[in-house]
Image: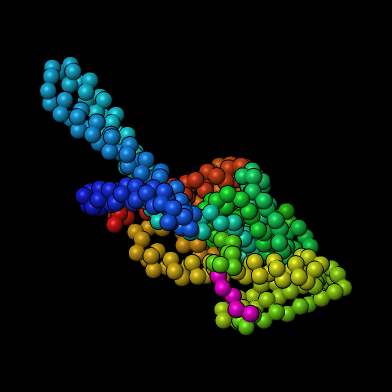
Amino acid sequence: MADPTLFDRKLDKLVARHGELSTLMADPVRSRDFAKLAKEYAELTPMVEGIGSLRKLQAERAELEQLAGEGDPEMRKLIEVELDAVRKRLIALDENIKTLLLPKDEADEKNAILEVRAGTGGEEAALFAAELFRMYERYATLKGWRFETMEISDTGLGGYKEAIAEISGRNVFQRLKFESGVHRVQRVPDTEGSGRIHTSAATVAVLPEAEEVDIKIEDKDLRIDVFRSSGPGGQSVNTTDSAVRITHIPTGTVVSQQDEKSQHKNKAKAMKVLRARLYERERQARDSERAATRKSQVGSGDRSERIRTYNFPQGRVSDHRIELTLYKIEKVMEGTALDEFIDALLAEDRANKLSEDVE
């Protein structure tokens, strides 16, 4: 465990910095730095308020512990009850402060690019990919987020080979980031006459949407090809070369967009997806070393990692990372029960981080 003295010293430094920022913000000479100072001040304020409450409770505990050693047995019994309540509040407050001190994922507040692709299982996998895509669309609606479909490559039979959407709103990436990975489905396909259960899969990737300031892409590193859009089975969608394929030469990343009739709109969408993929690539590389030192992880975000199984005959959905099973598959697919998994995954990730020593 972390040294309590070091932890207390860290808290004292935060309180001192908060006071220093207050003084700097009142200094007219520092007016051009006001926005930056105010941002740091606002971020520290909830921590400092928590530290104040913690110090007050610690003093109350010390006073009660002293009183517990004095007086008659009846009074000591009452003091012990009160002391027990104070200790419980201290534990909760201490954990809350440590949570506020945890390093924040800079991408948590960003919008997200959702990519769903059919995996093994042929048309059944494509049908499941389409259902997952609609599940996230319903979930986004429930959250009051904006869900904009960017690209759908359908099979012509109701399934999706690939579907991409932009999801905008408050803390979108934070809540969806643990959805990345392989989602497996077990059920009897409509075309299966013998009633045999088939297993197929779809891959989900949730990428933080990157701004131009987050990732620099040089024009010389891009190869842009235009071609005629086509629908399922090669059916022509329009008669102009409006579809766009962008290749990022250094990484070999390829993005295609043909949803819009305008070549410019398709290029803008393709660049948005490319920027998100490259930004996520950088994040993964930057975080890999830190992740390797972690005692445990909810999930690496690796698209090849099997994270969840949807068993329709038994009506259950199981998340393999946290060993949580819900027997409410309809509600999960409707999006209404998805928060039960997401909240549990976020809690597990927070618990893992809290188990590490506070420097």
Q: Which corner quadrant holds the C terminus?
A: bottom left
Q: Up-down: is 339 above or below 166?
A: above
149 or 205: nearer the viewer? 149
Q: Would you identify the image quadrant in which residue 261 lies?
A: bottom right
User: For this rendering, which residue is in front, 108 or 190?
Assistant: 108
The residue sitting at the right extreme is 239
Which residue is pictured at 27% across the width and 48% down the height? 12
Of 29 and 91, nearer the camera is: 29
The answer to whether any part of residue 281 appears in the image is yes
Q: Position of residue 194 (x, y in %)?
A: 69, 54
Specify how the rendered protein is coloured.
rainbow
User: Quick check: is 230 in the magenta stretch?
Assistant: no
Residue for point 48% across, 58% down: 32
Q: Is residue 93 left or right of residue 5?
A: right
Q: Is residue 160 left or right of residue 99?
A: right
Q: Is residue 63 above or below residue 201?
A: above
| Vertical arrangement, residue 99 with respect to residue 292, above or below | above
Percent x, y for residue 204?
A: 59, 60
Residue that appears at 30% across and 54% down: 358
Residue 146 drawn at (x, y percent): 67, 51
**Picture layout, residue 324 above or below residue 36:** above
Q: Write the start and end of the magenta stretch as one range.
A: 215-219
Examine the rendering and report whether any part of residue 298 can be seen: no
Residue 85 x/y as whole percent: 29, 29
